[in-house]
Each structure stands twice: as structure tokens, then as C-alpha cells.
Image (spheres, helix red, strand yellow):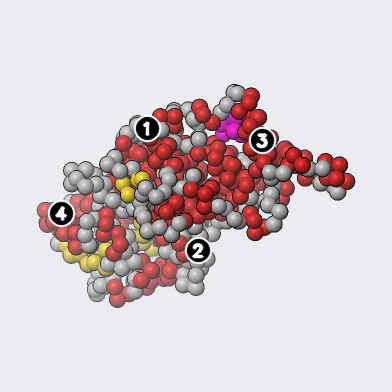
């Protein structure tokens, strides 16, 4: 996540056994092997019609299926809407009074009407067994040993209907994802119909998250996840008096402040006796992280050091600043001048995958700090292609002999995890974030809807819908990062007790459900004991 400034958000998940993941989707005591595609041949299961997809698609997912050139636009309220040639379930749900409920699911999705329930069962039976299920010869099935399979399918559809009746949105999302994972398009189609009635971008956290996860599933089927990811970039509001959506997210959630404050504390401590400091930021965005550090170094006993900051950034991020990196340099230079701190800014308007030693402007006699805040998870590794930029950048940082290297990342495993475990982790992590937002902004708050749609939905869609090089949100657990740093030649540099105390003071102004844990020199910030962000420091 980025602040008003850094544009990344992500999340962390537990490592959970496969058996535990399965229990959220299927009846107990049933192996997933029993629940394979209902299609007679594997190929038919993949033939998902445009007509079926269009009823769910939003934004780019609908237009891209038809090879349309239309792109996502924004309504006066700031909510994304599709062009006229496509349909949008998110827009429909947002504006429909039937879906602005505060219960876990809309009242329209749980029926007490016997006729409706029978119709729902018949729909599911058709999805499970095909349209000719009435013509099955039961005696022939028994003679051929097919009775067991029919019994399994019967149990399965009954379980699905029970989930609908309970209004269990999490289980239904998992069931839909598993159906897609198994190429069971009949079941996926039916479940999407049910889910569309249950999600709401203005409902409870699970309903709002469910809307974006359903969009991700639709985009996965339509192969349009990358288009949505690009379309939903956080844009600055038209009025200069309004904060960007990411800045609002920065203010209402402590995750980013926590990460940047802890990294700054580690850098300030490592540089306490240095007269020339060079900070290399591999994702500087709007540069807000360094405002507090410049203030802190200006107040250092004995006077401030001279500071050089090298800002690395993908030029395509200029949309969030309204211009190039020179805007960041001017902003930081103005602050440093007001604090009487000698300052120099060096820009490197390239992406992290392109960075080489000559781009960093290293000068003799400098004490170097390297900052990897919410950026390394965007670097492809050996699982994506032949070039492992993730480890290459760590080796490049090591070659600089830095005084300190800071890492702030999401505690999640979405890099190499297969589709279904990745879906499950994404759901649990982002649900924690959506719940934490509820603690600060009312559900009907327009800016809350904008923040979630423009700044969180794009990441959710990318994680769920995209594969290969198109999936850029590739988070790893701290244990994996630790292995990478050690392999590159670094050793841990535990964060000081002063940094810990500062973060604890920060959290006092937020909801008491946020948690902070220090373990082996690493800080973990979480929501209700679920780790969301980790921060740590390393030295040569």
C-alpha cells in the first residue's frame, strides 16, 4: 500500500492445511476428489459463454470479452461504472436499495417460500446433473455402479442449498472458487447467480469484500483481470482540496504509518553518528515517508546530517502525483530547507526490475540506507520467469554495503500458492482490512466506498484473476523474506525498544482491536490477532 503516497496495499494470511481449507467448502468427511467437474468431457467445462459472464461482469471484465475498446469510467460520485456496452453488477448492487442491508446477506437471498426453495433445488440439480436429469434410468445407473456417484452429487447439492439458506457468504465464495478450480462451470454459473444477490459494496465487510472477490472470479473466467487492475488505479480527485483515496486509506488505517514509522526509526538509529546520509527508496511514490524522518534528523543533537534521497519509481505512477518525480524532489527540498537540513534529491524514473548500480548515483563517503517498503512483492521471482529480480535487487543492495536495509511487507502467501489456497487467504486477509475500515468510517460514507473500490478492489482482482507475469501482487510470508535476505548475505538488525514504544503510542489513537507484537526483532501489526503488516531491518 502506499500512503497518500505509496500506492500498495496488501495483506497477510496464515499457512493453513489443505484439509482445513476444504472444510470451508464441502460437506464433512468428503474428499475433494469426489467433487470434480460435472461436465462429460473436460473441454466442455471450460466453455463458459459470454452471455453467462456478462450478467456478472463489471468494469473491464465485460468489455474485454467482446474485444471492446471501452474502459472503466468514473461516475460523479467517484464510483467506477462500465461503459454503456457492458453491464456492471457492482454498479447495480451499489445503487440497488435491496442490497444496502446491514445483515450478513441480503434478505433476497434467503427464502422461506417453499416454492422458491424447490425452484432453487431444481436449479442446482440441473447445474449438477444437467438438463436431462429427469430422463435418467435409475435401474441402469444402479446396474452400472453409478448410484454412488448420484448419491454423492445429491449430498453435494443439498449441502449447497443449505449454505444458501444459512446465508453463509464465505462458504459460498469458497465453493464458487473451488468449482472454477475444478473447471465445473455449471456449478460456478449457478453459484455466481446466488452470490450476485448476496454481495453489496455498501453492506457489511464480508458483503463488500464478496463483491470484489466475485468480480475477481468473473474476471478470471473472462481473462480480464489485468485490464481491471490497470483500470482501477487510484486517481487524485479533481479538486485540489480533496485528499487522494490512498491518502484517506493512509489516515484511517494505521498499517502504512506503522510501516513507514518503524522503517524511519531503524534508519535514524543506524545513522545517528553519520554526517552524510544517502537513502535509496525503491518505491518513493509521493515521498511522504521521508517528511517525518527529515524532521527527526533536523532535531538531532549536534546538528543534522546532509541528506541525499534517491527515489526509484515506475514512470506510470505519475498519474497519482500529477507529474514526474521532480514533484517529489521539490516537495522534500522545500521541507528540508525550512528545517535547515542540507538536502539533495536524485530521481530514477524506472521500475524496480530495471534498476542497475549506475542508476543509484552512489558517491564516496556516504552512509547508505536502502528502503524496501511495500515494493519487493511486486518484483517477479524465479516462479514467474527466468529473471529473479526479487533476489537480484537484494544482492544489488548488499553490494552497496549499506548501514541498514528496511523491509515493510504484507504478511501473506500469494506468490506461489495455487489458486484456491490463494483465494482463501485473500478472503481472510482483506476481510480483516475491511473490518478495520468499518471501525473508522461509516458504511454509507462515500469516501469509504471510493477507497475500497479504487484502492483495494484492484489488488483483490489481480490476486484472484491473474496468473503468470500479469499477477503482480505476489506477497510472501516473513519466513520466506528472511530466507532471501540471509541468502543475499544480510543479518537481522532488531528494531529498538524506542521504535516499539513509538508504534504503540501511534496505535492508541486507533481501535483497540489492532494488535502489535514484537518477535525476534520483527514487528507485526495485526487486526484481532491476525498479522497484516511486518516490519524489520537488516545489516551487512
Q: Which secondary structure dominates the residues rendered in magenta?
A: helix
Q: Residue at x 44, y 32 (%)?
A: 99
Rendered-image quadrant of the C terminus:
bottom left
Query: Which badge, 2 or 1, comes first in the chain's sequence?
Result: 1
Few, some or many residues within 10 Å of mark 1 (<14, 14–19, 20+)? many
In the rendered structure, which disc, 3 or 4, sits on the residue that comes first in sequence?
3
Numbered mark located on residue 335 in the image: 4
Secondary structure of the residue carrying numbered label 3: helix
Q: Which residue is mark 1?
A: 443
- Mark 3–mark 4 contact, CB under 8 Å? no
Q: Could you tell me if the residues under marks 4 and 2 are in contact, i.e. CB atoms within 8 Å?
A: no
Which badge, 2 or 3, is on the more N-terminal residue?
3
Residue 3 visible in the shown view: no
Q: Distance from label 2 to label 1 (Cα)? A: 35 Å
Q: Position of residue 251 (x, y in %)?
A: 29, 41
Region in magenta: 162-168
Mark 4 or mark 2, which has the lower sequence index?
4
SS at badge 1: loop
In the rendered image, the residue lying farthest to the bottom is: 358
Relative placement, left or right, of 390 versus 251 is right
| Disc number lying in front (1 or 3) | 3
Give the numbered dot on residue 468. 2
Left or right of 71: which side holds 241?
Answer: left
Residue at image mark 3: 122
Q: From the viewer's perspective, is residue 114 above or below residue 278?
A: above
Front disc: 4 or 2: 2
Q: Residues within 10 Å of mark 2 (few under 14, many from 20)?
A: few
Q: Give residue 126's quadrant in the image.
A: top right
Calculate the distance from the C-alpha at mark 4 to the C-alpha at mark 2: 42 Å
Give how far apart the Cα atoms at labels 2 and 3 are. 39 Å
Amino acid at each position: 500500500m502506499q500512503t497518500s503516497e505509496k500506492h500498495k496495499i496488501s495483506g497477510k494470511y496464515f499457512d493453513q492445511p489443505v484439509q482445513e481449507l476444504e472444510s470451508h467448502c464441502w460437506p464433512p468427511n468428503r474428499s475433494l476428489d469426489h467433487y470434480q467437474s460435472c461436465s462429460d468431457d473436460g473441454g466442455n467445462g471450460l466453455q463458459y459463454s459470454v452471455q453467462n459472464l456478462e450478467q456478472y461482469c463489471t468494469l473491464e471484465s465485460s468489455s474485454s470479452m467482446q474485444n471492446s475498446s471501452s474502459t472503466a469510467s468514473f461516475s460523479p460520485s467517484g464510483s467506477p461504472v462500465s461503459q454503456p456496452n457492458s453491464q456492471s453488477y457492482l454498479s447495480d448492487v451499489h445503487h440497488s436499495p435491496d442490497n444496502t442491508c446491514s445483515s450478513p446477506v441480503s434478505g433476497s437471498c434467503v427464502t422461506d417460500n417453499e416454492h422458491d426453495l424447490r425452484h432453487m433445488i431444481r436449479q442446482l440439480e440441473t447445474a449438477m446433473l444437467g438438463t436431462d436429469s429427469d430422463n435418467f434410468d435409475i435401474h441402469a445407473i444402479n446396474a452400472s455402479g453409478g448410484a454412488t456417484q448420484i448419491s454423492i452429487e445429491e449430498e453435494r447439492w443439498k449441502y449447497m442449498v443449505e449454505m444458501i439458506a444459512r446465508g453463509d457468504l464465505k462458504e459460498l465464495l469458497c465453493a464458487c472458487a473451488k468449482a472454477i478450480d475444478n473447471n465445473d462451470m455449471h456449478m460456478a454459473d449457478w453459484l455466481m447467480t446466488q452470490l450476485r444477490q448476496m454481495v453489496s459494496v455498501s453492506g457489511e465487510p464480508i458483503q463488500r469484500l464478496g463483491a470484489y472477490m466475485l468480480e475477481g472470479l468473473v474476471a478470471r473466467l473472462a481473462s480480464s483481470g489485468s485490464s481491471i487492475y490497470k483500470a482501477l488505479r487510484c486517481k487524485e480527485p479533481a479538486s485540489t482540496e480533496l485528499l487522494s483515496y490512498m491518502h484517506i486509506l493512509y489516515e484511517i488505517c494505521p498499517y502504512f504509518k506503522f510501516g513507514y514509522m518503524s522503517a524511519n526509526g531503524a534508519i535514524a538509529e543506524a545513522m545517528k553518528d553519520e554526517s552524510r546520509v544517502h537513502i535509496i527508496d525503491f518505491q518513493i511514490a509521493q515521498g511522504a515517508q521521508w517528511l517525518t524522518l527529515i524532521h527527526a534528523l533536523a532535531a538531532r543533537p549536534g546538528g543534522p546530517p546532509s541528506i541525499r534521497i534517491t527515489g526509484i519509481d515506475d514512470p506510470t505512477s505519475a498519474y497519482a502525483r500529477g507529474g514526474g518525480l521532480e514533484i517529489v524532489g521539490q516537495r522534500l527540498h522545500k521541507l528540508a530547507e525550512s528545517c535547515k537540513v542540507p538536502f539533495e534529491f536524485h530521481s530514477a524514473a524506472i521500475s524496480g526490475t530495471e534498476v542497475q548500480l549506475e542508476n543509484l548515483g552512489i558517491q564516496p563517503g556516504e552512509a547508505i540506507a536502502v528502503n524496501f517498503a511495500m515494493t519487493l512483492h511486486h518484483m517477479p521471482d524465479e516462479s514467474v520467469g527466468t529473471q529473479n529480480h526479487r533476489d537480484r535487487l537484494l544482492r544489488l543492495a548488499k553490494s552497496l554495503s549499506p548501514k541498514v536495509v528496511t523491509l515493510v511487507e504484507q504478511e501473506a502467501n500469494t506468490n506461489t500458492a495455487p489458486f484456491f489456497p490463494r483465494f482463501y487467504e485473500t478472503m481472510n486477509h482483506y476481510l480483516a482490512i475491511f473490518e478495520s475500515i468499518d471501525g473508522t468510517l461509516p458504511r454509507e460514507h462515500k469516501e469509504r466506498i471510493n477507497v475500497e473500490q479504487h484502492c483495494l478492489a484492484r489488488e483483490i482482482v489481480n490476486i484472484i484473476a491473474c496468473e503468470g507475469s500479469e499477477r503482480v501482487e505476489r506477497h510472501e510470508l516473513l519466513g520466506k523474506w528472511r530466507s532471501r535476505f540471509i541468502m543475499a548475505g544480510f543479518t537481522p538488525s532488531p528494531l529498538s525498544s524506542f521504535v516499539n514504544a513509538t508504534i504503540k503510542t501511534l496505535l492508541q489513537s486507533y481501535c483497540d482491536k489492532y494488535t502489535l507484537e514484537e518477535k525476534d526483532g520483527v514487528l507485526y501489526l495485526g487486526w484481532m490477532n491476525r498479522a497484516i503488516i511486518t516490519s524489520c531491518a537488516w545489516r551487512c
